[in-house]
Image: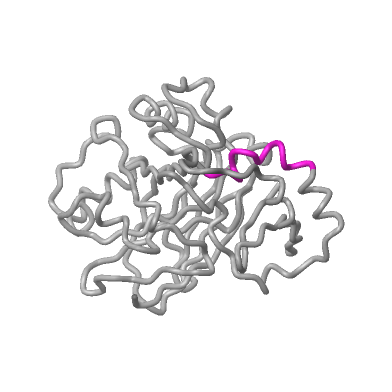
């Protein structure tokens, strides 16, 4: 199943090039009172809601995907977790190009650990990236994004995929510089998620997916998730050895080589096998 959020917080099922509005499903969500539980309520209830969503989609009038505004498929992630230097070819290019590493001594992901991006940085592909600090280098980083489906902590590698709700394409937009990654990567609109959530049953092996990114039609990044240093199960194990995850939390799994600068007016296209394709425009903030 491919689930999108579109226009004014509508919920849709994507089939081929059409969207089927199933927004009535949100009436099935439980009412909450303060303090609300951590996590995204819709993602928490997703498995139970799927049969009724299919029935609603069967009765809905199709709308063309090209005619809707795609938002982030996750509305309320508690946190966005990033995996630094998780492809060896990206480590190599960063060591050669100090405008990427900015003089930092690069270590392994096991030594560096994960980093957090502010959830206020999250947008969908149709919203685009509002670039700040245009006098500095702003880079694209295409990544497979993992969407957590239920609460867990200290999750073992062999059970990790049981905690996954689905997958999406992630763009970890980055201002290069001396600041910590969590600061440079948390600018408003610098976390792009989309074009929809693909449920995990449609991606049986997240460790073997082709990933590509183009800027204005020029191929910049071309790799496969088999080259991840820490694959998805190990990333979940590593992350949850330090802190809990909750429904709707997003883990961006890292980017391969080919990162490069973008500027206002550019259009990025990202494609991940079995997940989808999205286009994201850059504008000045």
* Colour scheme shown: one colour
Between residue 210 and residue 124, name the one nearer to us.
124
The quarter of the picture where residue 142 lies is bottom left
In the displayed structure image, the side of residue 108 where residue 68 appears, left or right: right
- Residue 63's spot in the image, x, y percent? 76, 69
At x 81%, y 53%, the residue is 56
Span of residues in magenta: 40-51
Q: Residue furthest front?
A: 33
Residue 1, image x and y in percent? Answer: 71, 46
* On screen, residue 70 above or below 39: below
- Number of marks in picture: 0
- Left or right: 270 in relation to 138: right
Residue at image coords 38%, 31%:
239
Which residue extends farthest left? 103
As drawn, is 258 to the left or to the right of 223?
left
Q: Is residue 225 left or right of residue 30?
A: left
**What residue is at 72 percent from the left and 51 percent from the top?**
25
Instruction: Based on the picture, tell me whether residue 49 belongs to the magenta stretch.
Output: yes
Location of the C terminus by quadrant is bottom left
Image spot of residue 134 (x, y percent): 26, 74
Say which residue appears at 38% left-offset and 58% top-offset: 121
Q: Can residue 83 be found in the magenta stretch?
A: no
Q: Which of the 4 image quarters holds residue 141?
A: bottom left
In this rendering, is residue 202 above or below 141? above
Q: Nearer the viewer, residue 175 or 240?
A: 240
> Depth check: 155 or 229 in front?
155
- Whole-percent x and y of residue 132? 29, 71
Chief secondary structure of the magenta portion: helix
């Amino acid at each position: 199943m491919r689930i999108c959020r579109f226009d004014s917080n509508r919920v849709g099922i994507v089939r081929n090039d059409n969207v089927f509005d199933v927004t009535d499903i949100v009436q099935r969500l439980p009412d909450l009172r303060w303090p609300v539980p951590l996590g995204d309520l819709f993602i928490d209830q997703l498995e139970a809601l799927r049969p009724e969503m299919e029935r609603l989609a069967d009765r809905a009038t199709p709308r063309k995907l090209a005619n809707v505004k795609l938002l982030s498929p996750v509305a309320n992630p508690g946190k966005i977790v990033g995996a630094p230097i998780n492809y060896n070819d990206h480590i190599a290019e960063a060591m050669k190009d100090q405008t990427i590493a900015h003089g930092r001594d690069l270590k392994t992901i096991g030594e560096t650990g994960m980093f957090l991006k502010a959830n206020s940085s999250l947008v969908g592909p149709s919203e685009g990236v509002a670039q700040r600090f245009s006098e500095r280098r702003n880079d694209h980083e295409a990544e497979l994004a993992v969407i957590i489906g239920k609460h867990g902590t200290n999750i073992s590698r062999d059970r990790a995929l049981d905690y996954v709700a689905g997958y999406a394409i992630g763009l970890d937009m980055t201002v290069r510089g001396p600041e910590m990654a969590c600061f440079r990567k948390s600018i408003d609109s610098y976390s792009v998620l989309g074009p929809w959530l693909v449920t995990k049953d449609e991606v049986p092996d997240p460790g073997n997916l082709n990933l590509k990114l183009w800027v204005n039609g020029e191929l910049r990044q071309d790799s496969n998730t088999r080259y991840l240093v820490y694959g998805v199960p190990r990333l979940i194990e590593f992350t949850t050895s330090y802190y809990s995850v909750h429904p709707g939390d997003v883990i961006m799994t890292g980017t391969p080589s080919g990162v490069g600068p973008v500027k206002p007016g550019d259009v990025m296209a990202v494609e991940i096998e079995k997940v989808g394709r999205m286009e994201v425009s850059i504008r000045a903030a």
